[in-house]
Image (cartoon, grey):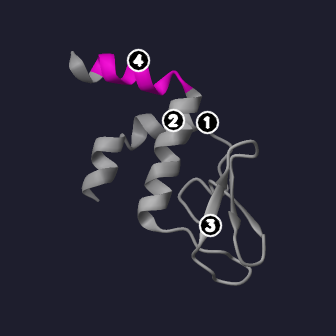
Amino acid sequence: MQAQLFLEKTCTNNVLAIEAFKLYRLSMGVSCKKCGHTNQYWMASKNQFQCKKCRFRTTIRSGSVMESSKLPFTLFHILFPPYILVTL
């Protein structure tokens, strides 16, 4: 019952799903595909990371299981809930 309530509250909101996925990506480490620099900052208006060194932008999906997917983040959130991602 609690799991269903959790899914209803978090998975229907794409903003929360993106935020959870962003935190997951940050915990795994984000590096620039162009220069390899690991110091990135988040551009909320674009939902992208930007390299502090060369300013190359990396999408939140890039380098993850969602890289070539057109599926919404809410579906990813259902398949891999945050409490599972923390233990990986």
Percent x, y of residue 73:
56, 38
Q: Can you identify the residue that label 4 sits on?
A: 8
Distance between mark 3 and mark 2 Cα atoms: 20 Å
Counting residues from the N terminus, which is met first, the one under dot 3 or under dot 2? 2
- The kind of residue on which mark 1 rests is Pro
- Between circles 1 and 3, the one closer to the viewer is 3
Q: Can you identify the residue that label 2 sits on?
A: 17
Circles 2 and 1 in contact, beta carbons < 8 Å: yes
Percent x, y of residue 66:
58, 53
Distance between mark 1 and mark 3 Cα atoms: 24 Å
> Is residue 14 found left or right of 1 in the rendered image?
right
Within the image, what quadrant is residue 5 found in? top left
Q: Residues in magenta?
A: 4-13
Percent x, y of residue 69:
65, 49
Counting residues from the N terminus, which is met first, the one under dot 4 or under dot 2? 4
Residue 62 in view in this figure? no
Q: Can you identify the residue that label 1 sits on?
A: 72
